[in-house]
Structures are given as C-alpha cells and as structure tokens.
C-alpha cells in the first residue's frame, strides 16, 4: 500500500499520534493518481535530483524516490522526522533535512547530492501560507534549477502564469516569468487532502528559460519598476511612477523623457505592459537618470 492511500495515511497518523498544525500549512495528499500525475508532469527519471519542500508523512516523497536519482526533502516540523524515518525506511536515496526552507543555505546543501552535477528539479506540495516567499527564495538562490513542478492555491498559480491585460497579471507574474515559463498543468480539487483546505489547488509547471526574457541593465531595478507599476492597480503608470520616484519638476521631466524613449503613454496602466516593455521602461528610466 502507498503512503498516500487513505487507509495507510490514517494508520500512519494514528500510529504516531500526529495532529495537524495549521500554522505549518499541513494538508496531506491522499490520492495516488494525482501523485503519479505530478511525477509524470515533472518528467523525473534516474538522471534527475529532486528537492522537495515539506514532505509531510512522505506521500509525494515515496513517488519521487522511486523515480529520481536522489531526493533532498526539507521539513520544518520536527515531529515529522521520526515519521518519515519510518515511512521512507525502504529508500536509501532520500535525505530528510529538518530545516525551514526559507532559512536553508541551498547553495551549500545541494553539494550533498551524491551526484551534484545532475539537473535539479523542485517538486513539492507547498505550504500555502508561504508559496510566494518560497518561490522567490528559490529563484533568488541563483541555483540553475531545471524546473519547478509545484502545487499551490489555484489563485496563486493563476497569478504567476498570468498574461498582460488580465486581472491576475502583476509583479509576481513578472518576477517568475522573467526567468521561467509558467503553465498550469492541472487542477487539484480540495477533497483529496486531509484536512481539506478551503480552496482548490493547481499544479504549476515552471521551466527555466535558456536566457532571461529580456536583457536589462539592472535586474533589481527592473523588478523595482515592475513592482512600483502595480502598487495602485487602478492608477495609471504615470501616477504609480511619480508616487514611487517623486513628483518634483526635475523628476517629472526625466520620467517624461523615459516614457517617450520607451514608447509608452503616461496614461497606460501597468497591467497592459508586457515583460519586454517593462524591461525597456526600466532601461529608459536609468538612461534618463532615474534610480
Ligand atoms: N508533501 C506532503 C503531502 O503532499 O502530503 C505535505 C504537504 S503540506 C501542504 C506542506 C508541508 O510543508 C508540511 O509538511 C509542513 O510541515 C511543511 N512546511 C511548512 N513550512 C515549511 C518551511 N518553512 N520549510 C519546510 N517545510 C515546511
């Protein structure tokens, strides 16, 4: 029987007297078909190392360990460590690391893979309360992950994969899509978890681009500009830029020059700009002396 089998999960939880901690976002998967679909979507084989965030009692870890070269699983809840030692005892290619993923030095950790040169994929059913910080932490680690295949709230998956001129499009879409393509692979109903969360989930597949979507002078500044443009969604780009950079006549003149150079109308809204247009805008602002 699989760990994720409903009866097996119940027996494991009972045997170890485990109680769910809401503050850790603990919703465990109990559907083996969905787990198989996740592994298929991630295209995992023995030439791939996997990082998992939040193994829980090992439902997904079991599927990953069977298919991948090695699995490194980061779990914050120390009560789960002895449970994982029990449920995953048959595998010698799993390392469970009892650490908060947001505080882990991943660059150092990944050197502990037996074969650190294999491509690394991140596959996880993420704790929903910190989905965005985790993704940003992974992206900013500068580790060249080949792919992320992760479960999250459907609404967040929609925001990350959103295209311009949609309600869901925003600085999060830009932050991720700058480095990766992002596509919802499939939707997961709330009924397949214990306990059931309040919302439906989605598996989002993010694949690293060969090169970033646009060449920009200063990536951090580019992200700052794209964030600033969405601070007040209903305001124009001009209003958001003056709120962020200042309203003096000197700054306004520079902003006008930059918008003209980037071929953008001041009355446009941030949500209408493609990622390339944001890149153009950021470079034009720098060229006009705005920083
Ligand atoms: N992978 C399991 C499954 O699919 O059944 C559990 C997924 S559950 C949604 C999220 C897991 O992430 C929990 O086991 C929780 O304890 C763990 N977790 C929460 N915050 C974490 C953090 N900051 N670092 C590492 N693990 C975390």
Image (cartoon, rainbow, N blue to C red):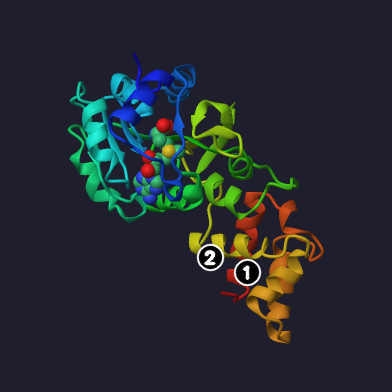
Any part of residue 57 in sight: yes
- The quarter of the rendering in which ligand 1 is drawn is top left
Any part of residue 5 in sight: no
Specify the quadrant that holds the N terminus: top left
Q: Return the residue at label 1.
A: 285
Q: Return the residue at label 2.
A: 221
Question: With respect to residue 232, does 247 lie above or below?
Answer: below
Specify the quadrant that holds the C terminus: bottom right
Question: With respect to residue 157, does 261 lie above or below?
Answer: below
Q: Residues within 10 Å of mark 2 (few under 14, many from 20)?
A: some
Residue displayed at 44% across by 18% down: 32
- Identify the secondary structure beneath mark 2: helix
Residue 50 percent location from the top left of the image: 32, 32
Question: With respect to residue 205, does 38 lie above or below?
Answer: above
Residue 152 percent location from the top left of the image: 53, 39
Residue 164 percent location from the top left of the image: 71, 46
Q: Are marks 2 and 1 in contact (CB under 8 Å)?
A: yes
Residue 234 percent location from the top left of the image: 78, 61
Q: Earlier in the sequence, mark 2 or mark 1?
A: 2
- Identify the secondary structure beneath mark 1: helix
Residue displayed at 72% across by 58% down: 270
Mark 2 vs mark 1: give the one in front: 2
Residue displayed at 28% across by 33% down: 16
- 3D distance between C-alphas at marks 2 and 1: 10 Å
């Amino acid at each position: 029987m699989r760990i994720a089998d409903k009866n097996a999960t119940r027996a494991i939880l009972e045997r170890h007297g485990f109680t769910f901690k809401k503050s850790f976002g603990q919703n465990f998967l109990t559907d083996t078909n969905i787990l198989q679909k996740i592994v298929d979507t991630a295209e995992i084989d023995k030439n791939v190392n996997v990082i998992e965030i939040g193994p829980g009692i090992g439902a997904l870890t079991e599927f990953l360990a069977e298919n991948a070269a090695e699995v490194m699983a980061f779990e914050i809840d120390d009560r789960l460590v002895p449970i994982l030692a029990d449920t995953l005892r048959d595998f010698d290619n799993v390392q469970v690391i009892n650490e908060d993923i947001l505080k882990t030095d991943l660059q150092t950790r990944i050197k502990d893979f037996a074969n650190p040169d294999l491509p690394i994929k991140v596959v996880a059913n993420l704790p929903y309360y910190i989905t965005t910080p985790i993704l940003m932490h992974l992206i900013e680690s500068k580790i060249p992950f080949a792919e992320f295949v992760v479960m999250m709230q459907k609404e967040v998956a929609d925001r990350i994969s959103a295209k311009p001129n949609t309600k869901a499009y925003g600085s999060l879409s830009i932050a991720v899509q700058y480095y990766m393509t992002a596509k919802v692979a499939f939707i997961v109903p709330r009924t397949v978890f214990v306990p059931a969360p309040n919302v439906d989930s989605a598996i989002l597949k993010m694949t690293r681009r060969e090169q970033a979507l646009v060449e920009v002078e200063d990536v951090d500044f580019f992200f700052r500009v794209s964030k600033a443009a969405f601070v007040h969604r209903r305001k124009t780009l001009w209003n958001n830029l003056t709120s962020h950079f200042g309203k003096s006549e000197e700054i306004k003149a520079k902003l006008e020059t930059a918008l003209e150079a980037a071929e953008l109308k001041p009355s446009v809204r941030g949500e209408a700009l493609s990622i390339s247009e944001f890149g153009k805008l950021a470079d034009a602002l720098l060229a006009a002396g705005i920083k």
